[in-house]
Image: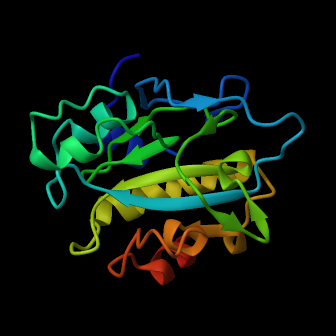
């Protein structure tokens, strides 16, 4: 699939091909870390995450390598403790606003881990996971907010059970384990933009 320049992605509304579960015009890097959702399960919530690999560094290949089981433990000391993880997200929004898709939206990505949302466990079953390239220590970029808004609107138009009230941070659904998207994520700015 050809890479679409980020500026074009930001200027045009985003659309989802519901049949194949892909955002149109974004780079697709298939992750093996996904499977079918339980039969009859509706996609009902959106979970916002943040990740940087190596921790606190941006722009490298580490996130894609992690989600594709290709992280080399010799590339960074931190990778030794995570290279065996089998994790993914549906989408990643990089610092410059580039969107990378790893899992078709109708499939179950392995992003939430042990989690609870709206009184239910196994949040991966009924959610879409979007990673922002970031950390607890750094503010997110204007391009990320702009593109995340467009991505979220497309998701909400396609999966109508997802409303503003059904968008959560990873910290909301796994508060004992996770802090992301972190204190620098501007929830008011994001939700008001929808």
Residue drawn 71% across and 31% down? 18
Farthest residue to the top: give it: 1
Question: Is residue 71 found left or right of 146 in the rendered image?
Answer: left
**x and y, in percent, of residue 57 in the image:** 14, 55
Q: Give the color scheme: rainbow, by chain, secondary structure or one colour.
A: rainbow
Question: Is residue 41 found left or right of 130 in the rendered image?
Answer: right
Q: How many marks?
A: 0
**x and y, in percent, of residue 45 in the image:** 70, 59
Residue drawn 55% across and 51% down? 129
Quadrant of the image occupied by residue 7: top left
- Tell me the quadrant of the picture where the C terminus can be found: bottom right
Question: Is residue 143 found left or right of 55 in the rendered image?
Answer: right
- Observer-nearest residue: 103 or 114? 114
Residue drawn 72% across and 46% down? 125
**x and y, in percent, of residue 131 in the image:** 42, 53
Q: Is residue 82 above or below residue 165?
A: above
Q: Is residue 53 above or below residue 163?
A: above
Q: Is residue 58 above or below residue 118?
A: above
- Observer-nearest residue: 83 or 92? 83
**x and y, in percent, of residue 140 in the image:** 29, 68
Quadrant of the image occupied by residue 85: top left
Residue drawn 32% across and 79% down? 184
- Observer-nearest residue: 24 or 54? 54
- Tell me the quadrant of the picture where the N terminus can be found: top left
């Amino acid at each position: 699939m050809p890479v679409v320049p980020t500026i074009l992605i930001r200027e045009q509304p985003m659309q989802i091909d519901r049949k194949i579960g892909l955002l149109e015009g974004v780079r697709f890097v298939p992750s093996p870390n996904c499977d079918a959702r339980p039969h009859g399960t509706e996609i009902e919530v959106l979970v916002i995450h943040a990740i940087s690999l190596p921790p606190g560094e941006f722009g490298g290949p580490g996130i894609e390598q992690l989600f594709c089981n290709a992280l080399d433990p010799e590339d960074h000391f931190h990778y030794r403790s995570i290279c065996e993880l089998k994790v993914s997200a549906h989408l990643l929004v990089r610092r410059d606003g580039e969107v990378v898709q790893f899992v078709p939206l109708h499939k179950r990505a392995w992003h939430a881990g042990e989690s609870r949302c709206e009184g239910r466990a196994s949040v991966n079953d009924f959610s879409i996971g979007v990673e922002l390239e970031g950390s607890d220590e750094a503010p997110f970029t204007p391009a990320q907010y702009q593109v995340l808004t467009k991505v979220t609107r497309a998701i909400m138009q396609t999966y109508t059970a997802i409303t503003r009230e059904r968008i959560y941070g990873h910290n909301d659904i796994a508060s004992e384990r996770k802090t992301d998207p972190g204190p620098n994520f501007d929830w008011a700015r994001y939700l008001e933009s929808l």
